Image (cartoon, helix red, strand yellow):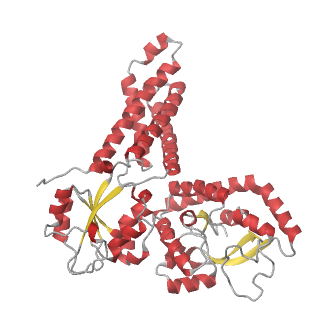
């Protein structure tokens, strides 16, 4: 029995870093040859000390990539997210190199070589990541996961993460039943044995054990789990596994202690300042580009039907404060003449012809840019709901009020991952993604959501 085992993921990350380091070193050398292709004497002079200069460039760029989370084990990035992170990494790395060159002039490689190096290096890194993504579908490179538990909680992995696309980064080796707890998982997936968790982990070459019993009291083999950790096996609870692999907080298995101790919820002053700066820049830029369209929409709404161009409605914002949300009117002026709040439905007969179009294209929400600039809303965050709905949902859905710990947004993670919600069940499903955002929000995450929203707008997904 091995006393120490190296993590397959750790080895893969180190190999990826070393490969990209070599790619970036070669990129500098290739850039130098391109820059001095017509000046052999200049190239000969430049190659003196090129090894150290190339290493400096490669270390700065890979360090920036580390800063932007590109060398994290067990984390999947979407294609857009990956390209965004690589772009920002090279921007940060380039600025860092310019500072170093100012402090240490002898390390300077020249503007032309630096620019070519960054361009070639970025292409090389994207190529490496593409090959890695293709190879990651191979079973041998996936995280080998053993699940401790075979009841309803453990079976959520089979029901909520059943698609091949959901399991790109891991492979379930089996489920270990817990004592006398009921078994829900299919018999073919069970591992029935008298061996300890450590013995099973060594025999099956397990990388990670997910702890998922239905009832934890008296069912947690803490000493065995500690021994597994000492062998280099990652031990993860089911809530954290879902958060990492599905980008959601699975509400029916989460308890308050996990929310408190699992990290996230960054409301520090630097985070607030960066989010506010992002809101001002994004909303200001979009408003500057969209104001002619806004004038046309306002004219179309006015010409089609009687009533105000702008529709005003009270919504619940950060920390439960109420604010007046504004939109271009997309329904008849008497849509709620009886005073009863209603969710919009598919093919809602209260919508006008222009209203259906601007709702599908999200043009009705452009006036909310002024609310972002004023501070009542953020560009990215949970969508604000009406007080009547919030009161009802708070009483029926656990942790619903947690989504109000940040400002509501024009767009958000839940809008990207789940279609328009028009029921308590839909609100419950969307809350899983809203809580994930509230826990993990950051500048890069906001940028990723903003760019992916373009796809939603272009293809009309989720609008109603």
Q: Is residue 79 left or right of residue 345?
A: left
Q: Quadrant of the N terminus?
A: bottom left
Q: Residue at x 48, y 13 (%)?
A: 42
Instruction: Identify whether 340 is placed above or below 213.
Output: below
Q: Quadrant of the C terminus?
A: bottom right
| Residue sitting farthest toward the bottom | 338
Give residue 314's quadrant in the image. bottom right
Answer whether residue 387 is visible to the viewer in this image: yes
State the residue lying farthest toward the front: 188
> Image point 31% across, 54% down: which residue?
143
Residue 322 in picture, x, y percent from top left: 64, 78
At x 37%, y 68%, the residue is 158
Compared with residue 449, is residue 180 higher up or lower down, i.e. above or below?
below
Q: Is residue 156 left or right of residue 427?
A: left
Name the residue at the left extreme: 1
Q: x and y percent of residue 295 in the render?
A: 82, 60
Which quarter of the picture shows residue 390?
A: bottom right
Tell me if residue 277 can be seen: no
Q: Picture coordinates of residue 247 (x, y %)?
A: 45, 63
Q: Position of residue 96 (x, y in %)?
A: 47, 39
Q: So how many labels did they put on this image?
A: 0
Above-or-below relation of 212 to 146: below
Residue drawn at x 50%, y 51% is 81
Question: Relative to 265, does residue 102 appear above or below in the rendering?
Answer: above
Q: Quadrant of residue 453?
A: bottom right
| Left or right: 297 as drawn, with respect to 120 | right
């Amino acid at each position: 029995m091995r006393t120490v085992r190296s993590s397959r993921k750790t080895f893969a990350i180190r190999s990826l870093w070393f490969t990209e380091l070599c790619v970036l070193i070669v990129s500098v050398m290739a850039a130098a040859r391109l820059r001095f292709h017509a000046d052999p004497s200049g190239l000969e002079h430049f190659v003196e000390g090129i090894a150290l200069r190339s290493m400096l460039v490669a270390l700065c760029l890979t360090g920036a990539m580390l800063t932007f989370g590109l060398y994290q084990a067990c984390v999947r990035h979407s294609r857009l997210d990956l390209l965004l992170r690589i772009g920002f990494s090279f921007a940060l790395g380039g600025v860092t190199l310019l500072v170093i060159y100012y402090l240490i002039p002898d390390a300077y490689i020249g503007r032309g070589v630096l620019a070519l190096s960054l361009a070639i290096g970025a292409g090389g890194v994207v190529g490496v990541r593409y090959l890695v993504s293709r190879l990651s579908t191979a079973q041998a490179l996936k995280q080998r996961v053993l699940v401790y538990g075979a009841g309803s909680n453990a079976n959520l992995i089979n029901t909520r993460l059943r698609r091949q696309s959901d399991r790109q980064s891991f492979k379930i080796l089996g489920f270990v039943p817990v004592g006398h707890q009921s078994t829900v998982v299919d018999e073919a997936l069970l591992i029935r044995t008298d061996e300890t968790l450590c013995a099973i982990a060594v025999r099956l070459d397990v990388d990670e054990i997910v702890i998922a019993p239905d009832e934890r009291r008296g069912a947690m083999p803490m000493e065995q789990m500690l021994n597994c950790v000492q062998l280099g096996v990652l031990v993860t609870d089911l809530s954290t596994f879902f958060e990492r692999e599905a980008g959601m907080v699975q509400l029916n298995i989460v308890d308050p202690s996990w929310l408190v101790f699992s990290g996230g919820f960054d409301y520090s002053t630097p985070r607030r300042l960066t989010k506010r700066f992002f809101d001002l820049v994004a909303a200001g830029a979009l408003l500057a580009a969209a104001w002619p369209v806004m004038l046309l929409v306002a004219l179309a709404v006015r010409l089609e039907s009687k009533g105000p161009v702008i529709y005003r409605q009270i919504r619940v914002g950060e920390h439960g404060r109420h604010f007046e949300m504004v939109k271009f009117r997309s329904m008849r002026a008497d849509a709620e003449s009886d005073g009863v709040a209603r969710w919009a439905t598919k093919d809602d007969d209260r919508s006008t012809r222009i209203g259906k179009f601007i709702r599908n294209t999200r043009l009705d929400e452009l006036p909310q840019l002024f609310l972002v600039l004023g501070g009542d809303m953020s560009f990215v965050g949970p969508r604000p709901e009406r007080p009547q709905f919030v009161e009802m949902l708070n009483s029926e859905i656990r942790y619903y009020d947690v989504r109000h710990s940040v400002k509501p947004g024009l767009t958000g993670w839940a809008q990207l991952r789940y279609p328009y919600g028009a029921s308590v069940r839909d609100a419950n499903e969307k809350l899983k993604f809203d809580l994930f955002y509230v826990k993990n929000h950051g500048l890069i995450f906001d940028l990723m959501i903003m760019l992916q929203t373009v796809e939603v707008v272009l293809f009309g997904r989720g609008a109603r």
